[in-house]
Image: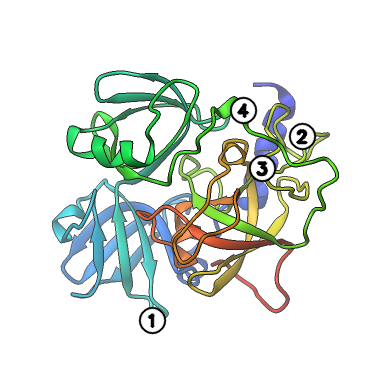
Amino acid sequence: MPTTHLRRAAHRRALFAAPEGREAARSAPGVSGMVLDASPHLLVVAEAGARGAETRIAMSEDTAIWHGGRGGPAALRPGRSVVVRRTGGGRADRIWVGIGRVSGTILACGRGTVEVDMGPHRGRAHVVIPPSVLGPVLVRHPRLEPGYLIDVICVGTPGGPQAVRPGTSQPGYRAADLAAPEAAAPVPRELRGTATWFGGVEGEWRDGASYPAVDPEGDAGGCADAPTGCAPMPYLSIGSQITVRNDCAGLSAPVPVIECGCTAARFCDRCVECDASPRGRIVELTPAAFAGLGGDLAAGCFNATVRPGGPRGMEGPW
């Protein structure tokens, strides 16, 4: 890896390392990590990137558990990854076990499998699509062909990610045919569109956002070959702060930009979680941030408003 990339990675870790100790972790409603122990009333999690910190989360009969669909306490096995959304009182409201997401450009299709290029930051994924899931996936992704985009919600298995449902509807164009906005199109101060989530950075940085318009010039951290997307957006840099609002839940929080969202920029789609959003993915959040803002990881998206900078008077994580 070039020296400049090593310096940039070290700079990101210094800026966005998860806070040490349990007190900082308790303030965040969204938690991701690995199950250490579980009983009917208590979940013990080793938080991702928290340098060995353990978090104890109370559960109740009302706690909803997802594991490829509706699950139960038996899914909370030690060693499995989880994302937990807590209530204001700290109790587990919803738990997603082994959830993952694969989105990107289709490279190849086999019998019940798809090879996906998820972009320069996330590499490739080999996704299994069981026969029981293929029908629903084809309804929203009718072109399972190389060159087209795919977005599926998965559950982790020993053999890799297994699709359980489509994440969003497939755009009708090839990934390379995305039409850029007009050069003279005004850039709004507030962006409205779709917020989704992504994985793949657990344990390296604290949770944050992948932003589709990171400046490719200088040391801003953007990708030189990233598409411009279908909506005009202001250029930001790695380390910038944005305010993300879930327009469906009415929740907002400041979130740091930790990655260039070059894959998200290729999706000119809509979220219809609570209404039809304007076209374009304007932010991808890490799972804990997405869940903490009221998003359902299995649903895949929420209608969002994004504004560069942090809101006045708002401190702390989501």
Residue that badge 4 annotates: 177
Q: Nearer the viewer, mark 4 or mark 1?
A: 4
Q: Which mark is residue 216?
A: 2
Q: Nearer the viewer, residue 200 or 284?
A: 284
| Alpha-carbon span between mark 4 and mark 3 | 11 Å
On the image, the x and y values in percent for residue 265 come to 62, 40
143 over 42 or under it: above or below: above
Mark 4 touches mark 3? (CB < 8 Å) = no
Mark 1 touches mark 3? (CB < 8 Å) = no
Residue that badge 1 annotates: 89
Q: Please state which amino acid type lies under the numbered disc 1.
A: Gly
Q: Nearer the viewer, mark 1 or mark 2?
A: 2
On the image, the x and y values in percent for residue 276 come to 51, 60
Q: Please state which amino acid type lies under the numbered disc 2.
A: Pro
Q: Please state which amino acid type lies under the numbered disc 3.
A: Cys
| Alpha-carbon span between mark 1 and mark 2 | 42 Å
